[in-house]
Image (tube, helix red, strand yellow):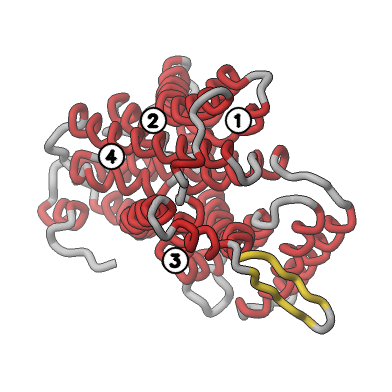
């Protein structure tokens, strides 16, 4: 990444800012570089996601709505020898392309566990507690409003946070947001993704078949053996990855989880003679494609809610309220409340330069569920009125959280922030904990 003299880290190091220890400045610059690159892509992709969602909603409610529905039901088949596998376009996006999205999620989790915010328990304590609160409270609100009803199956919908949209909102707040607050959001979102993956695997999979597990295990074993023999070419791993996907599909587990498994298996140490580790290399290769291609396509295919088919009455009221209130209120209370409690009892501490007002902003922004919430909604309900109502609730709740987070951030975060001092504090804290 090109660093101009206006960069606060370099400027502080050059002018010898009081309290700015040069080795610490260089350390934080090295640590923040991949994070800044990741967040920059996420922030920009949030805009593309928004455009795709608005386009889908407009298309689904236009005179050409029939064409919108027909497009995603276009059959597409794959034939290998005498075997033919045919599904509609919607399946290939949600169960096929989204596997690559989950693969990148797996890579990010693997990298964070190895050398990021999740590599040290002390540093991971706050985002871990915040993420757990941000998942449990929205689910509890949803269950309280939908207990005993057919809609109760959607309890996992308001648990998710969309990192692209959330980072995009923080980006709009500009210099008001300290670096440590952005890192807190990133770590929280990664843990949130782990929670969503576990929820999908344990509660939104059906018809478990042991044969499928055997096929998936064979694919995983092949990957491990290939790594042991030093096979470096990424394309060589495509076939065993497809075997894992096919096994997961046959086993009744959502096949996108195969992407997570393969991502977690990716080595985090560079091969001899190579500068970047396979995790870093593959993340750079796929991240942009996922952010600007797969996620917007998913939004276009899933955010098109025909408003005429939405029923906010009877069961629909509790479903809509459970999701929307769970995202906006539940996430805010869960993330902020859990963080306050953890700090109060001494289990975790806020990063230097971060106040509880900043955590409150992160809590509200965390209510932007969108991608993962829409994904879980599609698993929780079959096509019909309940699914369309759930999708609309996700869109309304996410939009409310986004606007609310932006307004709250402008109100409570200081206008002027000494980023050099904040970076130095972050460096000192990181070097001490390392």
Q: Nearer the viewer, residue 152 or 215?
A: 152
Residue at image location 69% in from the left, 57% down from the top: 255
Query: Mark 3 packing: few (<14 Cα in 10 Å), some, or many (20+)?
Result: some
Q: Is residue 6 left or right of residue 422?
A: left
Query: Would residue 137 be visible to someone looking at this image?
Result: no
Counting residues from the N terminus, which is met first, the one under dot 4 or under dot 3? Answer: 3
Counting residues from the N terminus, which is met first, the one under dot 3 or under dot 2? Answer: 3
Task: Confirm or deny contact between disc 4 and disc 3 (CB under 8 A).
Answer: no
Q: CA distance from mark 3 to mark 2?
A: 28 Å
Measured along the vertical axis of the image, is residue 382 above or below residue 414?
Answer: below
Q: Quadrant of the C terminus?
A: top left
Task: Confirm or deny contact between disc 2 and disc 1 (CB under 8 A).
Answer: no
Number of numbered discs visible in the structure rendering:
4
Q: CA distance from mark 1 to mark 4?
A: 40 Å
Q: Please tell me whether mark 2 sits on a helix, a strand or a loop.
A: helix
Q: Which mark is residue 350?
A: none
Front: mark 4 or 3: 3
Q: CA distance from mark 4 to mark 3?
A: 37 Å
Q: CA distance from mark 1 to mark 3?
A: 29 Å
Residue at image location 30% in from the left, 49% down from the top: 24
Q: Which mark is residue 425?
A: 4
Q: Please tell me whether mark 4 sits on a helix, a strand or a loop.
A: helix
Q: Which mark is residue 363?
A: 2
Q: Quadrant of the N terminus?
A: bottom left
Pointer 1: what residue? Answer: 155
Residue sticking out furthest to the right: 211
Pointer 3: what residue? Answer: 293
Counting residues from the N terminus, which is met first, the one under dot 1 or under dot 4? Answer: 1
Front: mark 2 or 1: 1
Query: Mark 1 packing: few (<14 Cα in 10 Å), some, or many (20+)?
Result: many
């Amino acid at each position: 990444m090109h660093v101009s003299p206006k960069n606060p880290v370099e400027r502080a190091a050059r002018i010898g800012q009081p309290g700015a220890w040069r080795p610490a400045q260089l350390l934080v610059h090295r640590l923040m570089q991949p994070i800044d690159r990741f967040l920059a892509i996420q922030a920009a992709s949030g805009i593309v996601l928004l455009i795709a969602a608005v386009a889908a909603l407009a298309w689904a409610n236009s005179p050409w709505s029939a064409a919108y529905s027909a497009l995603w039901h276009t059959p597409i088949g794959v034939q290998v020898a005498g075997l033919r596998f045919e599904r509609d376009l919607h399946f290939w996006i949600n169960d096929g392309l989204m596997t690559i999205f989950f693969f990148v999620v797996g890579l990010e989790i693997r990298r964070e566990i190895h050398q990021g915010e999740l590599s040290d328990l002390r540093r991971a304590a706050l985002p871990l507690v915040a993420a757990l609160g941000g998942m449990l409270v929205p689910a509890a609100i949803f269950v309280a409003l939908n207990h005993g009803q057919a809609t109760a199956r959607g309890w996992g919908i308001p648990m998710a946070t969309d990192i692209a949209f959330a980072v995009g909102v923080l980006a709009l707040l500009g210099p008001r947001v300290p670096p440590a607050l952005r890192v807190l959001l990133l770590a929280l979102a990664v843990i949130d993704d782990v929670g969503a993956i576990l929820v999908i695997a344990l509660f939104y999979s059906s018809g478990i078949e042991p044969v499928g597990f055997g096929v998936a295990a064979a694919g995983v074993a092949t990957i491990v053996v290939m790594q042991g023999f030093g096979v470096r070419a990424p394309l060589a791993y495509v076939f065993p990855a497809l075997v894992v996907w096919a096994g997961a599909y046959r086993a009744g587990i959502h096949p996108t989880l195969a992407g997570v498994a393969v991502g977690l298996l990716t080595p985090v140490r560079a091969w001899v003679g190579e500068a970047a580790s396979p995790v870093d290399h593959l993340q750079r290769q796929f991240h942009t494609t996922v952010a600007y291609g797969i996620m917007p396509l998913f939004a276009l295919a899933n955010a098109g809610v025909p408003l005429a088919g939405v029923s906010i009455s009877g069961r629909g009221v509790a479903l809509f309220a459970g999701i929307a209130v769970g995202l906006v209120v539940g996430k805010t209370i869960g993330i902020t409340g859990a963080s306050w409690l953890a700090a109060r009892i001494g289990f975790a501490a806020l990063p230097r330069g971060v106040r509880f007002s900043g955590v409150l902003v992160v809590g509200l922004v965390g209510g932007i569920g969108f991608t993962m919430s829409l994904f879980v909604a599609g698993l929780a309900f079959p096509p019909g009125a309940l699914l369309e109502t759930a999708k609309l609730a996700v869109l309304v709740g996410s939009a409310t959280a986004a606007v609310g987070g932006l307004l709250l951030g402008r109100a409570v975060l200081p206008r002027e922030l000494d980023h050099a001092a904040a970076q130095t504090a972050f460096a000192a804290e990181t070097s001490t904990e390392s």
